[in-house]
Image (spheres, rainbow, N blue to C red):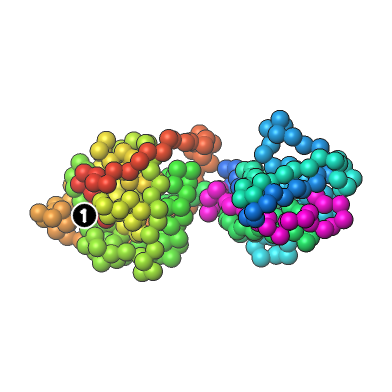
Amino acid sequence: AHGNDEPPPGSEALRAELQPTRPIYTTDMPVRVRFTLMNTGDRPVDIPLSVPWNFDDGVTLPQTLLLGQPDHPALAFSFNNEAPQAIKPALAGSGDPSGVTLRIAAHSSLGAEVDLRDYYSGVRYPGAYRVEWQPLGPRGPVGAAEFRVEPRKDAILVTDLGKITFALEYELAPRNVENFLELVRADFYNGKTIHRIVPGFVLQGGCPNGNGTGLRKDGKTVVGEFHSTPVDIGTLMMARRPSDPNSASCQFLVALGRQPSLDGKYTVIGRATDPESLRTLQALAAVKTDRTDRPLAPVTIRSINLVDADSERVRNLGHRSAAPSAPSAEPARSGR
């Protein structure tokens, strides 16, 4: 964006940042990333632009900063640890200042959220990506971000009494779904038990201690991602401490009926609605338990396996969204 390859005066106070909107993108969703150019200094910084631009365009970051110039591209992608590939923009302009100046005030920022697929078609393919952004030329600040793109997966939970197939809620709970996928891929759940069954309410499983007290071995917990979507039979949720909405770890709950009292209070990561899954849930709900809701005979999770999501269902799914809702500190009859 600066004709002589030198960043503008005061640019040492500028910081370039990239922030993916989610840790994992599926191949059927936009790959939206937030670009931010921040002025951390006490004085404004003026950036000459090579192409005229104004806020009336509806764009919050000039494309000459977002994409660079053909001779100095601002974006570079690497795929699965390969060498970075610069993305040359198709922009009009000579690369010399146009007389238009962008001023970033002291301690302020300018940003834009864009779908990277609009600029790099290769990001549509499954794999690990790293993107680097250098908006002020080769001597300016650099921002970088890493993320994954993968096919949408369903999770098949196999128990002693049958299997349950969950369609995962990537859109509504990206970080909790990522946590669940990480555990499944590590075979964490294989051999664990469903240690709590409350007919007409929920079942609970995935505890490494088998009694509702256990966490992941590394102690990691995940921030709650709460939405007002209804909790009905087959809804898969991350269990947590009643007093801490951000304490989800490895244990999960599955609703055994419509539960309005749980709406918006637990992070929903999946749903099971097919006939075979519902029959398995009915069989699990009929298991005899003691006074603490613990099955009299162990119910083992033989495995949880990931399979490519049914393509017809994904097409009908669309991109669902729901308004966030504040979690309750004390949900009724909850578990870890």
Residue at the spot 30% in from the left edge and 47% down from the top edge: 254
Identity of the residue furthest to the bottom in this view? 217
Q: Quadrant of residue 323?
A: top left
Q: Name the spot of residue 327 as percent of width and height, x first.
A: 33, 43
Badge 1 element: strand
Identity of the residue furthest to the top in this view? 56
Q: Name the spot of residue 61 as percent of width and height, x first.
A: 69, 42
Q: Amino acid at mark 1?
A: Arg
Q: Name the spot of residue 72 as percent of width and height, x first.
A: 82, 54
Depth order, front residue of 182/191: 182
Asked if 163 appears above or below 138 in the picture, the reply is above
Q: Is residue 126 visible?
A: no
Residue at the spot 73% in from the left edge and 56% down from the top edge: 11
Depth order, front residue of 326/230: 326
Residue at the spot 85% in from the left edge and 41% down from the top edge: 99
Q: Give the quadrant of the C terminus.
A: bottom left
Q: Residues within 10 Å of mark 1 (few under 14, many from 20)?
A: many
Residue at the spot 77% in from the left edge and 37% down from the top edge: 53
Find disc 1 in the rendering and name its residue: 196
State the extent of the magenta-drawn residues as a range: 1-26
Identity of the residue furthest to the front in this view? 42
Q: Name the spot of residue 199 as percent of width and height, x first.
A: 18, 45
Identity of the residue furthest to the left in this view? 291
Q: Is residue 332 left or right of residue 327?
A: left
Q: Is residue 82 visible?
A: yes
Depth order, front residue of 192/250: 250
Instruction: Please tell me whether residue 259 belongs to the stretch shown in magenta.
Output: no
Instruction: Please tell me whether residue 12 belongs to the stretch shown in magenta.
Output: yes
Depth order, front residue of 104/150: 104
